Amino acid sequence: MKLIFFVLTLFCCCTIKAQPPVKMIEKPVLINKTIKNLPATYDFSRIKMCIDRAPSTGNLPERNFAAVKLPPKINSDGSYATVGVSRQPLAGETNKMWDPGQTITVFISPNNASDFIRDKVRFYARQWENIANIKFDFSASFSSAQIKVEFGNDNKSWSWIGRDVLFNPLQFYTVHFGMFDNSTAEDEFRRVIQHEFGHALGFIHEHQSPAAGGIQWDKEKVYAYFAGPPNNWQKADVDFNIFAKYSKTTTNFSAYDPLSIMHYAFDAELTTNGVGSPFNTDFSTIDRQYARQLYPFPVSPSSASGTLRTGDDCDMVDFKVDYNAVPADKVEFTLQLGELNAKKTTWWKQIGIPKTNNTETFLWVQNHSLIKEENRTTVTIQIPLNEIDVNKGISFWKAKLLGVHTLLNYKWNVLPAIKGGCRITLSWNKDSCL
C-alpha cells in the first residue's frame, strides 16, 4: 500500500552479491538472451530490485514528535488543559524515518559532476520539503553531513534507507547518482533524485508493498531470466528478492499506488497479462498525501483569547494568543492600556516575563506622567523561547495608592501552553471597581 518503509534495516540494490557495507545499489539488470520468448534486443535497464542486508550495528533513537504536538488548550479564563492534544505517530512507523520538522544535513561531492547537476540534486531533493515536514541543509562539511552524495558514470543509483546513515563510522557515501550528465532530460533528473531522496527519508519501493498485488509476474520467465548471468540466482533467491512481499507487521502502508515516485517501471515482457507498470517521473497524489501523514506538519489553533482577572480592584486584562505569528524560536509579548465601555485605563501598569536565569523581562506602560518621554500606551518585545522559564508565571504590577508601583498577588501560569512562534497580547481594560 503506498510509500512503504521498513521497520527492519533494508538495503536497496540490484544484485544479491554483497556490496561494500550499507550500500543500496539499484543498477540495470542485463538481459539473458537464451530465454525463450524474450527478444534478444529487449532492454531490461529499467528493472531494479531490492534485497535485505544485515541490520545496522546500533539502536536508532525513537522518533521525536515534539515539533508536531499541539500545545495545551488555553481556556477563556486564562487557564489551560493540563493534558495537551498531540498528533500521534501512525501505528507501526519505522524508526528509520527522521523526526518531523528535522533539518537533515547533506553533503554533495564536488567531484565527477558539474555545478549544473549538483544544482539539480539540490532542487529536486527540496521538492520533498513541500510534501513532508523535513528540511535539507546542504553543507560544505563531508564529515558532519548525515547524507553524503556522490556521482559516477556507472549507470547506477542507490541510497541508504533513512536514518541508517547515523551508523556510518567509515564515512561511506550514502547516496550515489551514476547516470547524469548535462544532457540528461529534466524528467529523468526529477524521477531519480526524488526517488533516491525518498529512500533517504525512509521510504522503500512501492511495488514491494504487502498490498501490491497488481503485478502478475510470469514466474517461469522471471526464474529463467535471473538464473542467467550476471545474477545466476537460485529459485529461492528469486522468491526472496522478487516475489516476496514485505511483511505487514514490519511495514506501514496505505493503498497500493502504482503511480508513486517510489514505484519502478516493469515492462509487460515479465508479466502474464501483458500489463507492465508506468514510468513515473513525479510525486503522485497519494505520495503527497501520505508523506504528510508520515512527516506531519505542525497543526496549531489559530488563536486563543479571553479575560484575566487579577483579583485586585476588579482588574480585567484581555488576552489573545496567536500561534505561528512570529519566528518559531521566539515568543512576542505586547502590553497595552485599553478601555472598557469607553472608559480608558490609566496610570502605570507592568508585566514580568520569567527568565531561565532567575530574572524577569519587564514590559511597562503608563500615561499622565509629568515626564512626557515616560508616557507610552503600548510596548512590544520578542524573547527567545529558550530564555523563558515556562515553570514560572507571568507577574502583574500596577500603580496603587500614592502611585506606588505594586506587585500584585496574581500570576498567570500560561507559559507551559505557549510554544515558539506565539504572539501574546495583553490589554489592561479595567483597573478599578468604579
Image: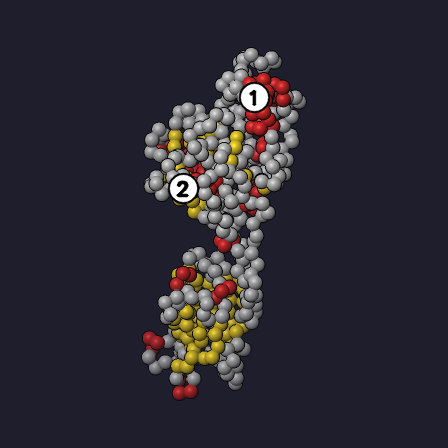
Which residue is outermost to the right? 273
Is residue 78 placed above or below 234 in the rendered structure?
Answer: below
Q: Secondary structure at mark 2?
A: loop
- Callout 2: 10 Å neighbours few (<14), some, many (20+)? many
Residue situated in front as seen by the camera: 319 or 104: 104
Residue 200 vertical position relative to residue 405 in the rendered view, above or below: above
- Going by the numbered disc 1, the residue's amino acid type is Gln
Report crowding for label 1: few under 14, some 14 to 19, many 20 or more residues within 10 A (C-alpha): some
Left or right: 309 as drawn, with respect to 336: right
Report x, y in % for residue 290.
57, 43
Q: Which residue is mark 1?
A: 234
Disc 2 designates what residue?
A: 146
| Direction from residue 337 to residue 7 in the image, left or right | right
Based on the displayed image, in which of its 4 quarters is residue 233 positioned? top right
| Relative depth, front residue between 221 and 369 | 221
Residue at image point 59% right, 20% down: 223
- How far from the left and from the top, in percent, is residue 359? 37, 70
Q: Amino acid at mark 2?
A: Gln
Tell me: residue 108, above or below residue 223. Answer: below
As rendered, which of 20 and 335 lies closer to the eye? 20
Q: x, y (%) of residue 89? A: 56, 49
**Mark 2 or 1, closer to the camera:** 1
State the residue at coordinates (61%, 25%): 276
Q: Secondary structure at mark 1?
A: loop
Give the residue displayed 43% in from the left and 38% down from the top: 123
In the rendered view, tell whether residue 295 sits above or below residue 327. above
| Front position in the image: 297 or 185 | 297
Residue 309: image location, x then y, percent: 52, 76
